[in-house]
Amino acid sequence: MNQPAGIDVDENGTVYVADPRNNHVQVFDRGGTFLRRFPEAAGVPREDVSAGTTVTPMDVAVAGDSVYVADVDRLLVFTNEGEFLRQFGQAGTDRVHFDGLTGVDATDDGRIYLADSGNGRVLVMEANGEKIWSVGTSLGQSELLTESHTYLYQFGLPRSVAAMDDGTVAVLDVVDSTLVLFTGEGEFVARYGMRGSSPAEFSSPGGIDAAGDVLLIADTWNHRIQVVEPAR
Amino acid sequence: VTSRVASGSASRVTRVTRARRWLIFTFVMLVASNFAVWSLVAYDWLTQVRYTGSAQEEIDARREAVRDAPDDPGALLALAYAYQQTGRYDDALFTYDAVLDLLPSETAALYNKGVILLKLGETAAAEEVLRAALDVNPGHALAAATLARQLVDDGDYEAVLEVVLPAAERSPGAAELHYLAGVAHEKLGEAEMAAERYRLALHHYPDMGEAREGLSSSRCNAVNGRGHTLLTRTRLLVANMVLAVLLVAGVYVYVLRMAGGGYVVLGGDPVLRLQPLLTVTGPGSGQYPEFLRPLDAAFGPDGEIWVVDTGNNRLVVLGRSGGLIREFGGFGVTQPLAGSEPEWSGGL
């Protein structure tokens, strides 16, 4: 591995690791035995991922039979075995484009949650890529707010996103060092935490996962992980 | 020889004008950028949600006091002032009138009423109550100054002197009154008397910039008979330095507000707390007992915690309570083979 950036574990305990500098996703079983990596061939131009291409996976999410890979400015979907299925998005700053996908999560009902950090927004979409709602815009993009199902929240930089069991969407803001919760419909719920090194404080946190009411946060620049429960 | 001297002085003149032009250019640029930055800050400040809870509490408390002692003009006055401070001018006027029913010659009520009426733009009514306050107490410096300022705006300089001079006699320490008298004298063309008044104002309040300016301009008027409005190089230089400091301060404030997250439009319930359940700083043993910049983490199916320990190029598996189960991985840019055993294992 070379500076691995993201991880997800499926219900069997199979582990998917986003290894951006090696340009692939590595898969291990729960005992740590290496199983496979994909896309198989590296170093091929990125235009056609189905033929094998260079991807830079920043984060990975697995739900059901699909593996979602956040590849900077596009979202790639593979089977569990690493076979390419489809991709969404391309580079850009308007509503259909991504600018620095740094976080992805997916649920078994097929919803995909994206932290589109360069565009300063979190986007929730159907498995077919249709937008359900989004929240936040980067500065100078306030015209996006006129779009339907776009909610107002000014992120510092949304780095990572996780969907909780009750549908609540948890977003880690790496610049504000805060945790922000939205309902499954995109309404703002609460904002927690602040920059600091005490418990329940963060320093540029990079990644988040959810289980039940509990959140697991990689508190990157405090060099630690935290498990927290938002009181509501 | 003559020509050389002449050309030398000419080039000096050019240099001077060029330096001055440069100063003026810098000045204009600084004014523009200051305007931009500070309007951003102001916009930011104006659009944020503000809470007036404490002001309301203050008003409630004072209203309670009035209910307890309805005939106490002091309690009424305090309530009226609280209304005035929070911008509820109609309530404040009503309450001041209640005070004046009890004590018709209460100058504080008259003066504050005048201030509010001025704010509401009812200048005639304001002048009337301010004059009433001065009838009761001709030495009421605040009332005199407020009325005089209004009269200066009206351009009635004779009336200014009529108001200000008796008040200044009774309250000689009020620099503002001397200054206003100076303004009136100056406008009436009495430069010497104006200068005298400005000097008195500065004597009582040495930092009063307006009076200082007035003094220098009235002196000029006395000597030249006309004002000097030229921007001297020193003044420009000082103004530029002040503006530069302001600009830096503005940018600093703006960045601070943005980075501090103060920009959030939506507020959360401040009672909400994040309950810390577990904090783990590393596997605690092995070659690298501490995490280094872990970028992501995920729960496994049995609640175990998988950590991508980015800086150490490894994965760490922790139990539900944070104890180390396993760690594996290591730096590598080669391609691992499917089915191969992990090459490096620390910890357990």
Image (cartoon, coloured by chain):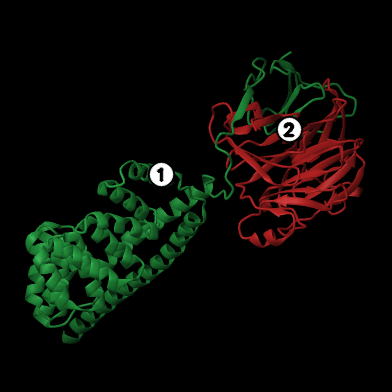
Q: Residue B104 at x, y = what percent?
A: 21, 59
Q: In the rendered image, is residue B217 in sight?
A: no
Q: Is residue A38 above or below residue B312?
A: below
Find chain B in the image and tell me its colour: green
In the rendered image of this protein, does residue A217 appear above or below residue B202? above
**For numbered disc 1, what is the local secondary structure?**
helix
Type of amino acid at the residue the image marks with label 1: Asp
Mark 1 vs mark 2: tell me if same chain. no
Residue at 21%, 79% (x, y): give it: B9
Element class at badge 2: strand
**Label 1 Cα crowd, 10 Å radius (few <14 / some 14-19 / many 20+):** some
| Total numbered circles | 2
Quadrant, the N terminus of chain B: bottom left
Residue A91, how many percent across, how many down? 75, 56
Residue A53 at x, y = what percent? 85, 47
Work out whether B74 lies above or below A230.
below
Quarter of the image where the C terminus of chain B is located: top right
Q: Is residue B209 left or right of residue A34?
A: left
Q: Which residue is mark 2?
A: A209
The answer to whether residue B206 is seen in the rendering is yes
**Dividing the picture into quarters, in which one does residue B150 lie?**
bottom left
Q: Would you name the residue on which mark 1 appears?
A: B60
Residue at horizontal 70%, vertical 40%? Answer: A160
- Determine the residue positioned at 26% across, 46% down: B72
Report the Cα–Cα distance between label 1 and label 2: 48 Å
Q: Colour of chain A?
A: red
* Circle number at residue A39: none
The chain carrying label 1 is B
* Mark 2 neighbour density, 10 Å: few (under 14) some (14–19) many (20 or more): many
Q: Which sits in the foreground, B143 or A169?
A: B143
**Position in image of residue B186 (x %, y %):** 14, 76
B242 or B256: which is nearer to us?
Answer: B256
